[in-house]
Image (cartoon, rainbow, N blue to C red):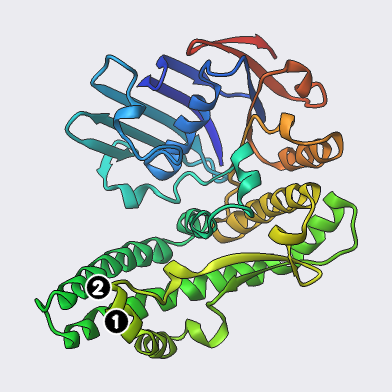
């Protein structure tokens, strides 16, 4: 997959952005808070139909404006063109794929991306919700079944928790939980199965990539905590929901399911988040990015676009070199504050970004 052009109006501080891309590597240089990350965010919008940085649509509109618009023209490996248009005003948000109106869920998967930003380095250290979100973002791009199951599961979970609250107030009966239990088991077991398939795919390449990047012999592995093996079956899922029903009724909350699972990284069978060095954690995230690229390509038969947002300052020279090996086979978009970071990259275009304006300075 390649992005041929990007247009943005009133998106963050990008008043009128028009860029055409001819090189494998496209880089944006400038001081902080000038709009470099906004360009990558606009590209991400084409992939998911929403920002991964903010839940507020209002924050995406340039201050003083009442709408924004982002358009991208891509090209698949078979030379088929893909045009994505997203527009939003104060009342609604619209999506078009190849000029035809669509809903947001139909957009995901048409323009696959893998992104790497400084905050990714905290993936192992912060809340389990971040690691679940990581899996959801990745697998929603590669499987429409996953995306639809995730949406259905979220609705069922919300309704079940609301029902538990009504039961606590004697406004509903416990038997009514059976319908929502079946819905959670149906969709949750599918999500668990697809997550497990990704982990199976990732097991060997993740370990190999880590050993190369970290220059260590230790074995790195991932596992889904509290959601293993037989629990992926719908029958077992229902059984486990039943075991915790008394607790659910007591706290008016659903205590079992894929929404509680965590993604655990182990180095030589020890939890990496607890025992790993900062260098080992950074090597793990880099290794994971290699796996993401390979997994998306295998599933979609398309190379995803790679987005690297200001990561050079967070990595030492050895890991910067490993990072650079990612870009050889993928169209890549890079932001940095120092043009010297780009010295080792060939076949690149360089733009300078100032206050939302972009000017090409080097080919």
Asked if residue 229 can be seen in this view, the reply is: yes
Within 10 angstroms of label 2, few (less than 14), some, or many (20 or more) residues?
A: many
Image spot of residue 297 (x, y percent): 61, 54
Left or right: 159 in relation to 303? left
Q: Are marks 1 and 2 in contact (CB under 8 Å)?
A: yes
From this view, report whether residue 140 is shown above or below residue 313.
below
Mark pair 1, 2: CA separation: 8 Å
Q: Label 2's element?
A: helix
Q: Nearer the viewer, residue 165 or 333?
A: 165
Q: Quadrant of residue 211?
A: bottom right
Numbered badge on residue 160: 2
The residue that mark 1 highlights is: 181
When the figure is inspected, residue 161 is found, relative to residue 68, above or below; the finding is: below
Residue at x 25%, y 78% (from the top left corner): 180
Q: Which label sits on residue 361?
A: none
* Residue density around tag 1, few if under 14, some if 14–19, many if 20 or more, within 10 Å: many
Residue shown at 73%/31% (left/top)?
A: 312
């Amino acid at each position: 997959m390649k992005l041929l052009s990007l247009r943005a109006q009133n998106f963050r501080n990008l008043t009128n952005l028009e860029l055409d891309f001819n090189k494998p590597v496209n880089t944006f240089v400038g001081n902080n808070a000038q709009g470099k990350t906004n360009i990558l965010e606009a590209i991400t919008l084409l992939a998911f139909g929403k920002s991964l940085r903010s839940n507020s649509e209002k924050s995406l509109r340039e201050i003083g404006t009442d709408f924004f618009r982002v358009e991208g023209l891509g090209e698949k490996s078979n030379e088929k063109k893909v045009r994505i248009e997203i527009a939003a005003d104060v009342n609604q948000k619209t999506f078009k794929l190849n000029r035809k109106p669509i809903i947001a869920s139909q957009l995901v998967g048409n323009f696959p991306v893998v992104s790497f930003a400084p905050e990714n380095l905290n993936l192992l250290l912060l809340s389990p919700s971040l690691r679940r979100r990581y899996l959801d973002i990745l697998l929603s791009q590669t499987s429409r079944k996953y995306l639809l199951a995730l949406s259905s599961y979220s609705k069922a979970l919300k309704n079940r928790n609301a029902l538990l609250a009504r039961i606590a107030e004697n406004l509903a009966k416990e038997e009514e939980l059976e319908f929502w239990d079946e819905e959670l088991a149906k969709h949750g077991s599918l999500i668990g199965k697809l997550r497990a398939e990704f982990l199976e795919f990732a097991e060997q390449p993740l370990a190999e990539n880590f050993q190369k990047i970290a220059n260590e012999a230790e074995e790195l592995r991932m596992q889904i905590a509290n959601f293993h093996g037989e629990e992926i079956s719908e029958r077992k899922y229902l059984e486990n929901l039943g075991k915790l029903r008394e607790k659910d009724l007591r706290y008016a909350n659903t205590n079992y399911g894929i929404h509680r699972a965590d993604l655990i990284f182990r180095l030589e069978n020890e939890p990496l988040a607890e025992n790993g060095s900062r260098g080992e954690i950074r090597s793990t995230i880099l290794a994971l990015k290699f796996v993401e690229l390979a997994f998306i390509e295998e599933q979609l038969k398309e190379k995803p676009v790679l987005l690297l947002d200001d990561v050079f300052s967070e990595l030492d020279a050895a890991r910067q070199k490993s990072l650079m090996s990612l870009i050889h086979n993928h169209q890549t978009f890079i932001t940095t504050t120092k043009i010297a970071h780009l010295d080792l990259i060939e076949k690149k275009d360089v733009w300078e970004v100032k206050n939302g304006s972009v000017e090409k300075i080097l080919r």
